[in-house]
Amino acid sequence: MNKAAQPGKREKGTDQDGGAGVLADRIAVVPTAPDPDHAALFLKDLLAHAEAGEALNALLDEKPDLEGFLIGVIGNSPYLRDLMLADPPRLLRLLQEAPESRLENLLSAAREARAEDEAGIMRTLRHFKHDLALTLGLADISGAIGLNRVTGALAGFADAALTAAIRFCLGDLVRLNKFAPHDLEKPEVDSGLIVLAMGKHGANELNYSSDIDLIVLYDPAKAPMAGTAEAPVEFVRLTRRLVKIMQDRTADGYVFRTDLRLRPDPGATPLAMSVPAALVYYESLGQNWERAALIKARPCAGDIPAGESFLHEIVPFIWRKYLDFAAIADVQSIKRQIHMHKGHGAIAVAGHNVKLGRGGIREVEFFVQTQQLIAGGRNPALRGRRTLDMLDALVDADWIKGKTRDEMAAAYRFLRNVEHRIQMLNDEQTQLLPKDEDGMKRVSALMGYDTLAAFETALLDHLRTVQHHYAELFEDEPALSSELGNLVFTGDDHDPGTLETLAGLGFKQPAEAAAIVKAWHFGRYPCTRSTKARERLTEMHPALLSALAATDNADAALRAFDNFLAKLPAGVQLFSLLRSNPQLLTLLATTMGAAPRMAETVSKRVHVLDAVLDPAFFGAMPSVEEFRAGLDRTLSQARFYEEALDRARIFTQEQQFLIGLRMISDTLSADRVGFALARLAEVVVDRILKQVIVHVGESNGTVPGGNIAVLAMGKLGGREMTAASDLDLILLYEAPEDVKQSDGKRPLAITQYYTRLTQRLVTALSAPTAEGSLYEVDFRLRPSGNAGPLATNLDGFIAYQQKEAWTWEHMALTRGRVIASTTPEFKQKIVDSICGTLVQTRDLTKLADDVRTMRARIEKEKGTKDVWDLKQVAGGLVDIEFLAQFLQLAHAQENPEILAQSTEQALELARDAGFLTLGDAGLLLEALRLYHRLTQVLRLALSGKFVPAEAPRGVLDLLVQASGSPTFTRLEAELADLQVKVRETFVRLIGEVETVNT
């Protein structure tokens, strides 16, 4: 039963709380449990509790909706379930109190928390956090309190916990005679120690599992240091200790993950900066993204008046009297990105990032913040921190219409509620909707929807609404005039008016730009030799130069386009295409700057651009069925085998290019690229195998009663392919015992037949034809490695895996996935045999030793200190993949349900089954997702090694966009930090990375 099949309540949702009274009386939403019987077993444990069970039973009898509500929460949120079971008396008290007063008391108690030692204060604050998480979770899901109450309580608790921790740390300094406070009970008063809350914390908009971004400053002239103590030394130490108290994971969990990297130049400055140093930085070196970040800055702990004074000092930096040209350029570059993906229709719901994805929370915040930066300098009413308040202020100031405000506010509340429910599932700092239907149903139920379809409809409505307003943000700005000014590229000398036009467009070296364009008209490149091609190119000049000027670096984009033209074999077709479809020009110009590797593809295979004209490009990613239908359509037109191979190459290159273009133009998140590429590859392998079987059959026939299957391993098996991935494959076969040879004109012995078939498959996939090649193919993971026959008999494969295979081969087998098979029964036989191998009982010590030995060997051969070698660096992808494979092999015998080919899914299942703590899973999943996103960008954009100092600016921008970091420098710092933590986790769970003789 679901009383809140009035999701209208959530959507139009007010920020107000739902009535008054105790929580048990205010249940407006009863989530549907996916497995009510299973959830009821946990409720039974609660009701059997010695101290609280009887009272809980009585309360359930008294409140008819309460049982269904608790079952719904238990069934959908493992995190909240565990908090309930950990302390049933607390649950009873929570249900019998008004959430508002309980939250007020919690925050007050946390602020006044005291302890004798560091372990004591850490334990106390973590217990309060558990209480807060359960109180807010139940009160929020039930509809008893609104979004403002939830986010405000989370931010208020962060303030209170920071205050308690600071008091403890300052108290220690007092005991050591290093600090002389004005108030012993509240040593932070007049201490000169400033803690600024940034981002959502600063705006009192914290989300459910958020980390907190802080800037810690101190005023050396004000700090009452004692003895020989020096403020810079002591406050840096205090800050390090403060972070430890807040974020270190203990048996009781953590309070908040704490990030200090929004401080000025975090790679080169101490954790706590002096106020004078910070002021100098912001006045001389501060960047526009820091201005946007400081809009939400708020003194949250420590010396509050000193913090207010500091923010007052930097008002001229944040709020410019006039909008300076650099800020305008920043805003315009963002505007260009908006227009680039404006109008792209379908949004896939599963796996969508409700914060960073299209139509997400970040777009609402940007919609508000951009207009604040533009107008806040002259209108102090637009300088507030909270998104919803500022939507109201923008209406009051006539910047937006009331209807726009109402729609954006409703969407913002809805999306923040969705974000909270995603995080309530496992206390994970993520904004990604689950990729599987079960996970989506949990979020939908916690949102109060009876059906997943109703939830998806509401979500898509809000995402599209936000996307529409976001895209319209600068709609009233004058567009680049088609009358750009002089563009004359004839004669010996450069036309002064043309140089002026080019400079006005943004070319820093207009004379060089004019020389490049002139050279095209001399017919020096094959594509400009014909008169018609030069005419088409001349007609394109205004649109082409405007598109190139709209990139981050007009000069570099023009040079890239020039290189592109130099490699084009012919031009008329492409120039006509671009002239008729100006949106293609924008995409092509973006590709020039952001993905040189893809630009190279276009220069060699111009036909890939044809596919962009298909309206389906702007829709959702094709499904397996749609890929299959598209490939079948083109293959059906082939007149002979070689033409079929060429057509498969054309289709695959187009689709790979479109997947890359979707990512660059932000219609496909980097999280989904690996899945899309794998989906394409498995369809191609399956269809090419069918072609090969027919082709071989023409001479050698088939094996009566025989079966063939292709087992994908590695990145294809795990659905984590990149644009540069090769295909790790094993071809498995079986034949009836009484059949000795194939039945064709030239029959072959069984082994010889399947070996021939495999050789033909390798050639069909990897040999270059006039249309290039499909994939590099690797068969070295078969039992015989490079030594034996290419095709593997299934019985031999099973025997080898069960009796002879090394641990590393079983690790590789965790990713084995059948992608093509002549019959479903043969496929199932292979799946069952793999499962049977992976669930064997294992000696865990030997397993751990084998895994770390294997990692040590790889590190010895390919080890690196380069943080951008995301695969091989210590704490990189290999560490996470080995951890996931270790957990599967260690525990599959006990729980086969944890087996999964994808590393991400394997970690999630290990977490859900209790083999991986929430903390470790959160860290590993965060790192894995970031590594995958960045790897996708690098493989699509570049061919060789990534060297940041030499990479095009557009590539760096794509990496920053994919990561969600504000700057490339901060992204590098985050990467290094994550890699250290991942390696520490590897060592803690498996052991030191070293060779062990077993």
Image (cartoon, grey):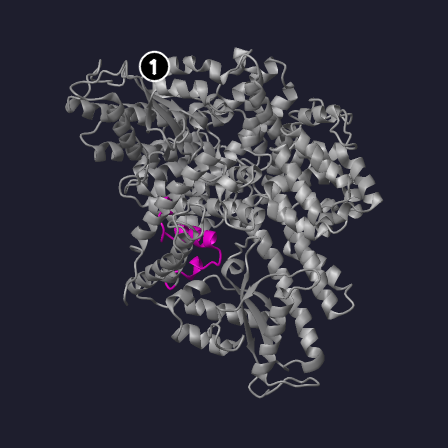
Which residue is more in the foreground, 827 or 194? 194
Image check: 356 left or right of 154? right
Q: Determine which residue is flagged by label 1.
A: 306
Name which residue lies at 73% across and 36% down. Answer: 517
Circle 1: residue type? Ala
Q: Which residues are magenta?
A: 893-920
Which residue is more in the foreground, 393 or 867? 867
Q: Position of residue 847 (x, y in %)?
A: 33, 63
User: Which quadrant of the view contains residue 679?
Assistant: bottom right
Which residue is more in the foreground, 976 or 10? 976
Image check: 873 left or right of 404? left
Mark 1 packing: few (<14 Cα in 10 Å), some, or many (20+)?
Answer: many
Q: Is residue 86 visible?
A: yes
916 over 977 or under it: above or below: below
Image check: 609 left or right of 338? right
Determine the secondary structure under disc 1.
helix
Q: Position of residue 285 (x, y in %)?
A: 45, 23
Name which residue lies at 60% across and 67% down. Answer: 820
Task: Give the quarter of the figure containing the C terminus.
Answer: bottom left
190 over 24 or under it: above or below: above
Q: Position of residue 801 (x, y in %)?
A: 43, 72
Residue found at the far right of this picture:
532
Residue 897: within the magenta? yes
Name which residue lies at 29% across and 28% down. Answer: 239
Residue 572: within the magenta? no
Q: Is residue 432 visible?
A: no
